[in-house]
Image (spheres, rainbow, N blue to C red):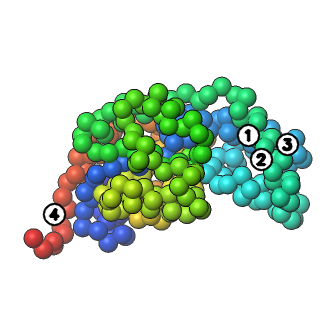
Amino acid sequence: MYQEAINNYLQKQGFDEINLKAVLFDMDGVLFNSMPNHAEAWHKTMAKFGFTLSREEAYMHEGRTGAGTINIVSLRERGYEATEEEIKQIYQAKSELFNQYPLAERMPGALEVLIKIKEAGITPMVVTGSGQTSLLDRLNKNFPDIFKRELMVTAFDVKYGKPNPEPYLMALKKGGIQPNEAIVIENAPLGVQAGVAAGIFTIAVNTGPLPDDALLSQGANLLFHSMPDFNDNWKTLLEYLNKKNEGSHKKS
Ligand code: CA
């Protein structure tokens, strides 16, 4: 299964092999179990403003800007986009509600796999649309000695955000690496889209309520059902990723 996924990736992107130097981790729903709170806050806030946005639909929009999500629902239910004032009010209410919830816990399995990745001499990086100012402190507290500030991509680094490939292209640039020298770990359909569009081998970890196909249909090269599942399979996967493609005809 791994070999087939790798071969499909190489063929599609036109590379001879994967030469793994960095693993690019999305944050919400991958490193922290923060998505249930986001989905709850979206659902309740939209209801308060007279809109219907189920918790599950909130997972489909994960990674989209607040304005983008609000406008999709507004167009669907009213036939026209929300005004700037409405967007501001709704997004502020959603943020206030979210901030009342307790801080999300570290995702089980995340620290374990990060330690293995680092021990293998591979660089873990964070690529997130989040712009919380306390982000680095939180990451360092929950994942001590794992991430370097200069190798992080946050909301402050990008203009468009996911599903645009920009955040992952920025990570490649910061790391000084090529698309076939990294893999992406994502839990959301739009995040998978971004990783694939950046030309990087993209692994979906389905940590939420969406069907697997919501992630696979966006082009995910592999799928795991949880972070502990990814952690359990990491060693075997790494062996496959490090295998040199014997079928290729590289000039030496
Ligand atoms: Ca995410």
Name the secondary structure under disc 1: helix
Image quadrant in which the C terminus is located: bottom left
- Badge 3 or badge 4: first in the primary sequence: 3
Q: Specify the amino acid type for callout 2.
A: Tyr
Residue 183 horizontal/vertical position (percent): 37, 53
Residue beneath disc 3: 47
Residue under pointer 1: 95
| Residue 40 horizontal side relative to residue 182, left or right | right
Gap between marks 1 and 4 measured at Cα: 51 Å
Q: Earlier in the sequence, mark 2 or mark 4?
A: 2
Q: Amino acid at mark 4?
A: Glu
- Residue at coordinates 41% horizontally, 36% vertically from top-left? 229
Q: Are marks 2 and 3 in contact (CB under 8 Å)?
A: no
Residue closer to the observer: 237 or 180:
180
Mark 1 touches mark 2? (CB < 8 Å) = yes
**Residue on which disc 2 sits:** 91
Residue 235 at x, y percent in the picture: 27, 39
Identify the amino acid type marked 1. Answer: Ser
Q: Residue 42: percent from the left, percent from the top?
A: 75, 42
Kindly report which numbered mark, 2 or 4, lies closer to the viewer in this rendering.
2
| Cα gap from disc 3 to disc 4, whole angstroms | 56 Å
Residue drawn where x is 87% and y is 65% of the image: 79
Q: Secondary structure at mark 4?
A: loop
- Residue lying furthest left in this view? 252
Which quadrant of the view contains residue 82?
A: bottom right
